[in-house]
Amino acid sequence: MHNLVTTMKKATFAILSVVLLSACSEREVSTSSAAANQASSVAQSPDVVLPTTAKLQSPIQIRYRVIGEPLVGQPTAIELSFSSTLGARPFDVAYRINDSTALRLPDDQLDRVAVSPSLDENAFGFAAQQVTVVPLREGRLYLNVAAEIETESGSFSSVTAVPVEVGSAPIRREENGAVMTDENGELVRSLPGRTN
């Protein structure tokens, strides 16, 4: 008799377990189905704006060509060409040298100029500029060129680092900032801030 009661208890427990598991899995299916229906209705609703990520791209592209062979102490010309998707809208071009011991602009070279592009048959704007730099040492030196344009939706800028290879010296790796040790004993590079 004891074995019969134990067997009945086990059978009842097994049946109850199956019923509970079945109910749980039906609840999960109906919950996930409801969530899918809700997501579908949100995506189809014209009033709902889903978050998106967009990368803004500058409307101005910069190309360059170093003319001749750069020599230390001799002026070197760099030919720049600009293409703009904003047509003939004028923009500014700025020249910056980060390492004044490597490169400099001659006294008669402006560090900022206004550019008015001309239109081609596809309504793209094109412009050309020539900038002169004077290398002060051998190696790979850089002139930073920034094209900045104002539009109704804000200002855009496009920046290009123009490499100037001078002489046959091996390329020197440019290091920014100073290497320091932090409070945990790890090496970190401290970069100075720059204001205009």
Image (tube, rainbow, N blue to C red):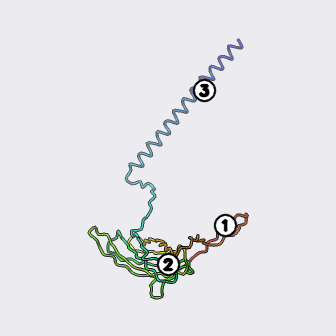
Mark before the other along the chain sequence, 2 or 3? 3
Residue tagged by mark 3? 17
- Give percent across and percent down for residue 36: 45, 42
| Residue occupying image coordinates x 54% and y 74% | 139
**Placement of the N terminus among the 4 image quadrants:** top right
| Residue occupying image coordinates x 44% and y 60% | 54
Which SS class for mark 1? strand
Placement of 30 over or under 11, stated as above or below: below
Mark before the other along the chain sequence, 2 or 1? 2
What amino acid is found at the position of numbered circle 2 in the picture?
Answer: Arg
Relative to 187, 167 lies left or right:
left
Residue tagged by mark 2? 96
Residue tagged by mark 1? 188
- Give percent across and percent down for residue 144: 49, 75
| Residue nearest the viewer, comparing 44 with 131 | 131
Question: Which mark is in front, 2 or 3?
Answer: 2
Q: Residue furthest top?
A: 1
- Give percent across and percent down for residue 182: 70, 67
